[in-house]
Image: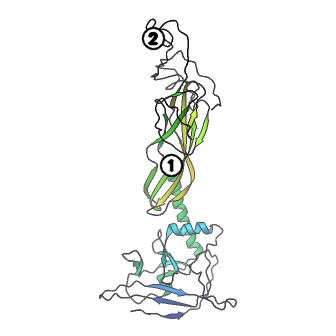
Amino acid sequence: MKKSSSVLLSFSLVFSTLYLSFPSAYASETCTTDSGSGNGKNHVGETCVESSSELGASDGGEESNDRSQIQQQSPGMTEEEWKAYLAENYSEHKTPSGETYYVSNTTGGSCITTDGKPGKLNPRMGYGEDGNIVQAVPRAPLQGRAMCTATKDKPAEQIEQERASYEEQVAEIKRRFVEMNPATPQLRLNDYPSPHVWKDENAHFYVDFEGSNQYEGELKAGHVRIEAVPISYAFESGDGGQYTSSVASGKLRAQSQEEMPKTPNSYMYKESGNYHAYVTVTYTGRFKVGDGPWHPIDGQITKTSEAALVRVWEIETHNVAKLCTEDPTAWACPGSKHRPDYNNPNPRLAVPDPHTGQQWHKDNVGSGDTEWWRKPAKKQTGSR
């Protein structure tokens, strides 16, 4: 059974500070209820609609269709910020006629009425099994603004209070992001095999990550998930070269006899020797509360990899007088003191480490270096 009623209202409200602007005159309110389902149980799921009209001479008393369009008037918050604030902190509900009112997700019982005033949800209202607002205590039908009754607080005071709470929540999320220890980047060299590359050929670098780039836990805003998203990779080749890429890339499949193709992360060494290469990853952040949408986080964090050893080789040819079978210690023979040790555990660097300044791969004294005869470190160059 359906009922309808019409009540004429006349009122004037004055606020010292207004954050929300709405049509200032309301002619009537109607309430439509559904109080039974025919099965002997009370199923009251009413929603109330306030009809409004502008009482100006210029529009002839035509009804306004803009009452549900909430506009933020404070110079401290833009319209986009206000919409984001509503989406983050309030659930939106519609009356049968399409008007909008909001129920707070963070402050129990707080709401914004259909005419844009801050208020409290009527204690007789509650949530049904489908998540919609219903009349929890079946008494006489609620009328108009009784669903969300305006409080005596000034709108500016309540909005500032909830806005401060929202800003505190966002600030806590930002702090958590800055304090995150994202996955450590691991710089890899894709050659035959790493760490060996040829002079004047492309050396392909790629980045792996060790660890997690996510945080998930309970904060003031609720159950929050934060992600650190890599957006930039700054490479240092170790011989003075620097370049940036937007991709981590991955290992390429190439045969040992094939030259490595040029990639966004590749580098061509012009001098043979041993080098320490690095990558510094820049992360931006994003977060979501519960099952809500992702939101960006202002600011960035960076993390630098450990040094990656790169051994650059070139081919040398010499005339020799004897075969290795005749003189095992001759040049390029297995017994030659000048034969490179491809498995040298601590080779001397051709250029000092760009971050630590050390002269050898593992230390600054050359412990265990099996190629003591190789050239000492030289000054850094800017060549690439």
Residue drawn 51% across and 94% down? 6
| SS category of the residue bearing label 1 | helix
Judge from the rendering whether residue 78 lies leftward or rightward of residue 281; answer left or right.
right
Front-most of 255 and 60? 255
Of the 4 image quadrants, the one containing the C terminus is top right
Judge from the rendering whether residue 342 lies leftward or rightward of residue 317; answer left or right.
left
Percent position of residue 162, x then y: 53, 68
Residue beneath label 2, please?
335
Residue beneath label 1, please?
179
Residue drawn 53% across and 65% down? 165
Among the 4 quarters of the image, the one containing residue 126: bottom left
Q: CA distance from mark 1 to mark 2?
A: 55 Å
Percent position of residue 173, x then y: 51, 56
Q: Residue furthest right?
A: 58
Percent position of residue 316, x then y: 56, 18
Label 2: how many Cα within 10 Å (few below 14, some 14–19, many 20+):
few
Residue drawn 58% across and 26% down? 352
Q: Are marks 1 and 2 in contact (CB under 8 Å)?
A: no
Amino acid under disc 1: Glu
What numbered label is drawn on residue 158? none
| SS category of the residue bearing label 2 | loop
Front-most of 196 and 130? 196
Amino acid under disc 2: Gly
Query: As displayed, is residue 66 above or below residue 228?
Result: below
Query: As displayed, is residue 83 above or below residue 28?
Result: above
Of the 4 image quadrants, the one containing the N terminus is bottom left
Query: As displayed, is residue 165 above or below residue 51?
Result: above
